[in-house]
Amino acid sequence: MALALGLAQAREDQVQIHGQAVGSQSFDATSAHFSYSERGRGDDITARWTLDTQGIPTHYEAKGVDYWKAPVEERFDLAQGRATWRNRVDQGDQALKAPAFYLPANPPPEFTAVLARALLKAPGHKLALLPGGNATIRPLQTMKVNGQDLTLYHITGLDFLPTPVWLHSADNATGAVLSDWLGTLPAELMPQREQLMDAQNAAAHAWHAELSRAHARIPKDGALLLTNARLFDPRDLSVREHMSVRIAGDRIVQVDADGKLPVPPGIETIDARGRFLMPGLWDVHQHFAEVEGVFDLIAGVTSARDMANDNVPMLARVKRFDEGTELGPRVVLAGIVEGTGPLAGPTDVRVSTREQAQAAVDWYAAHGYEQIKIYSSYPKELIAPIAEMAHAKGMRVSGHVPAFAVAREFIEAGADEIQHLNFVLLNFFPEFGETRGKDRYTFAAEKVSMFDLDDPRFAEFVALMQRHHTALDPTLVTLEGLFSGEPAQAPPALRPLVQRFPVVARRQMLSGAVAVPAGHEAAYKAAFPAFQKMAKRLYDAGITLMPGTDAFAGYSLHRDLELYSQAGIPNAEVLRMATLVPARLLGAEFDRGVIAPGKRADMILVDGDPLARMSDIRRIWRTIKGGRIIDPAALEQSLGIAPATP
């Protein structure tokens, strides 16, 4: 059946996450209603606009709520050459000397296609943007779908990666707007979603491959000598001055004092000039998508753990990381298992029987996964069976404590590790069984600052963790973001950086705060310091803590380490937590976690001293992964991030 989707024709598209229907977008030439729900979150926005003959907005207004259900109210007007706008992240009043396209702060997906059509009409296919920047568009390929041609375009200048959009070749009507996470497309194109995503992914892979070729430099003959470095050893927390490291291929060959290593003729040499040299960092809680791997290497994260993803694409991404055709760290894979119901997470690995649990474990084990992650709707009665199945395969078990269970039960059923510190707190409040909705944040905020860490129940729980050798992935940086609650503010981890980001990325960060519920302001303000104290108490008791973010890749890990330092954990111990501890716990100590002969050549040079000031960990001068040299500042600029000011 041929598609007939003219520019003025009203239609309703399906909103999908990982191919599962979660909502709809109804739109015509001048309006859109975009609404979806997943785990109780999701946008619900109604927008209306007016365009001039060149497709440039002269009026835009929108109301509704964003992903975290914070209110959205936005208005833009262009009259007599003057543009005015107001939304929750910025406002402006500007006289225009040339056409400029206003980008809303919280637009429906259809507005990407509106911008694409305006760019196609613009001279040179380029437009200035409001509130700043420029956008360009170029066609990549045309495909015949249901008897009509669809063209894939890339828009650059909005985000770190090119923004894809599909338009009908005949009249530039919207075809589909798809991403790794969320997409909108009409019923007629649903059977072709995989075909469209394959084309998008091929274009993205080509972009990533070129980025890797340009920014992950292999030294001449694969040999490299680092000299004059201050070398940190997480095994004994020592720092040795004036040290050299010789690398051949992706391995460390020798480590010794300057002048004691033989220098092969012609070997490339990097003079560290006294910079701090340490093993590459670990982030044990990530969800890789389009560009996270790049930001990891910018931030010196050379090893990471993916804690749930779209499985088959993730396996392909890890392969590209390992081959060097996409920039990214070495990855430990955790496979998610979830239950059923309206609050279930966005995965197709749903378990309600022992047979399904066994099938999930078997599949993950056969595909190289090292861990099972249990999610919030997983059946409580199947925790112990799946833990036994996973352990029989040599796999670890961790996750959220499922709804209507508490952390004690989770550990006693066989969990090796808990994700998110708030589940430790909720152990002491079993009456709050429904942990899947937003109310869990409000409840945690109200309880954590009042909970007495000298309560005997806390000591008993810590003793349980000690007996079972239970590890904790606290995600402090995520908790800080959840309880910061400041409108028009980026998460604390990104505040030093966000003004350097491209316009869409910057606005997404500024509009992404979780609103503080009315009447809970004092509790939210007190909540995070109380969680930091709990983390420090667990550390003092010998519980294994591992830095993990569950947030914006790379930079968020730097903030996570700062938060551990602020909590009172010595900086040297924090650096060990971010290097050697995950390598040991996750089975990678044989080739990672320390700079020593025979280990992988994964290391970072820091232009500062994170032992004295943990904030210096943000000053990564070079990242080396597998002997390949990466300049973080140059890589940032390739993503459209403005240079840092001195």
Image (cartoon, rainbow, N blue to C red):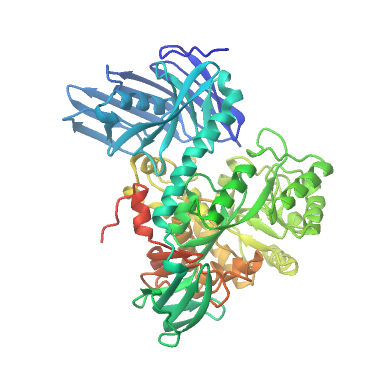
Tell me the quarter of the image containing the N terminus.
top right
Image quarter of residue 61:
top left
Placement of 16 over or under 504, stated as above or below? above
Q: At 46% from the left edge and 66% from the top edge, which residue is drawn?
A: 566
What is the count of numbered marks?
0
Judge whether 289 appears above or below 476 on screen.
Answer: above
Residue drawn at (64%, 39%), measured in percent from left and top?
A: 345
Q: Is residue 538 visible?
A: no
Residue 129 lies, with reference to residue 549, above or below; the image says above
> Of 611 and 586, which appears nearest the observer?
586
Q: What's the residue at 42%, 36% (across, down)?
A: 163
Query: Which residue is drawn at the image coordinates 52% and 74% (left, top)?
Result: 252
Please identify the quadrant where the C terminus is shown.
bottom left
* Percent coordinates x, y for residue 278 in the rendering: 47, 72
Side of 300 relative to 186 (left or right) = left
Q: Position of residue 516 (x, y in %)?
A: 47, 43
Q: Is residue 461 visible?
A: yes
Q: Where's residue 457, x and y in %?
A: 70, 63
Q: What is the quadrant of residue 169 in the picture? A: top left
Residue 349 coordinates in the image, percent (x, y): 71, 40
Above or below 266: residue 259: below
Q: Nearer the viewer, residue 323 or 557?
A: 323
Front position in the image: 407 or 646: 646
